[in-house]
Image: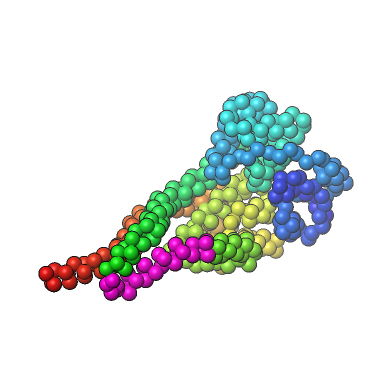
Amino acid sequence: MKLAYNAYERSGRQVADVIEAPNVAQAIDDLRRRGLFVANIQEATGQGQALASRASARPAAPRARKLGSAGKRLKSLSMFTRQLYVLTASGTPLVEALAALERQFRSQGWQEVVHQVRRGVEDGQSLAQAMQERPDAFDGVYCSLIEAGEASGRLPAMLQRLGTLVQRKLHARNLIVGAMVYPILLLAIAGGVMTALITFVIPRFGELFKTLDVPLPASTKALIDLSAFLRGQWYVVLGVAAAGGTALFSYLRSPGGRRTVDAIVLGLPQLGGIVRSFITARITRLMGVLLESKVPILDALALARQVAGNSRYVDLLRQAEDSVTRGQGMSPPFVTSDLVNPSVSQAIRNGEQAGQLGPLLSEISTFLDEDNEIVLRSLTSILEPAILVLLGLVVGGMAVSLFTPLFDIATVMQGGG
């Protein structure tokens, strides 16, 4: 079948064309392998092909201002969505609501985004079409939900759901970042202390021991030799570290490397289970909103693959698409997979059989979000003292290695006196 699509390159340039594929899911996969972000895809008609030709001939938009870090972008998107919901729900015309939000934003980047969306709506585009012009602000999932809300005539209700979805995503991100801050701070302080010891303290002790000409324990000698090597060959160490980091980064970006790392992360004791739970919550949260918004299940699964963030879950969702295509429903791959908790997969099967899959997925995501928050806080409370103990052992071991020869010298001198 021929499918007309609108997509974006990594640079942000819009691409519109026609692709031949057996189904929509396969077409999206083919386009993603070409490095394209699919914003809209549908069966090609004469009109659709003409629109694609005109869109591809459209001049490239000027380079957009940066919207800040992922956290700032998500926070601004949450505020935009919730306030647009309030304005549209109160009866404010869409263009006026966008104009009000444009004046309200202090960030020039987001002012530009809202201005571009407002101009698009004024020029006759739908809100979803106008948002698709800015994939750096509104991803494919967001635009698809807006499109569904416009098609059903219930845009305010959809904005309310989207606001909740984005807010929960922001909360989950803040939870993870907050849990990482203190351990990373401790490790940074430890790195600074270790650098100071190796650069300044240990060399002084080495000179002292050389002057005293005393036999040194193996641990003390190894510490002094390590300090001398790192100070004398620091450029070699940095070069090897840079080369290793570059090679590792390239490997992680490759499909094989990504799959290997994904499998390793999911297989880690304790941590793997937490990662599984967070990914399952993310997928069920999105699919719950999509299905409750009357988005077809195949489209919902394709969109969920874009946010899965793990190649094994992408494979699971692709298997679910194939299962739905064969008329067997979405649940069989989930039931047989080791990636999903058995109670969750059974609940998905029951919800599918009862015709309440969307609401049930939303309930599952709420439960998982609450459980994940408790587990992450518990893990953090255990991890922080563990890191402190580990750092204490390392620094304490270095101190013992340095001071042991001094104690031996003092003992000998007292005995001789």
Which residues are drawn in magenta? Answer: 213-238
Up/down of 123 relative to 140, above or below: above
Q: Nearer the viewer, residue 377 or 244?
A: 244
| 211 vs 241, nearest the viewer | 211
Quarter assignment of residue 57: top right
Q: Is residue 43 magenta?
A: no
Residue 370 seen by the camera = no
Question: Residue placed at 63% from the left, 56% from the top?
Answer: 305
x and y percent of residue 84 in the render? 60, 32
Quadrant assignment for the C terminus? bottom left
Q: Is residue 217 visible?
A: yes
Residue in view at x 59 percent, y 36 percent: 81
The percent position of residue 277, horizontal first and vertical second, equals 49, 57
Numbered-mark total = 0
Type of colouring: rainbow
Which secondary structure class fits the magenta region best?
A: helix
Decide if residue 269 is on the left or right side of residue 61: left
- Of residue 206 and residue 312, the one placed in the foreground of this image is 206
Residue 221 image offset from top left, x and y in percent: 34, 71
In-image side of 110 versus 60 (left or right):
left
Q: Residue furthest front?
A: 211
Left of 16 or right of it: where is 380? left
Classify 368 as above or below 221: above
Q: Residue at x 57, y 54 (%)?
A: 283
Q: Quadrant of residue 311?
A: bottom right
The residue sitting at 63% across, 40% down in the picture is 66
Q: Which of the image's four quarters has the N terminus?
A: bottom right
Residue 358 position in % (x across, y down): 58, 50
Q: Which of the pair 182/86 is nearer the observer?
A: 182
Residue furthest left in the image? 417
Q: Is residue 398 above or below residue 371?
A: below
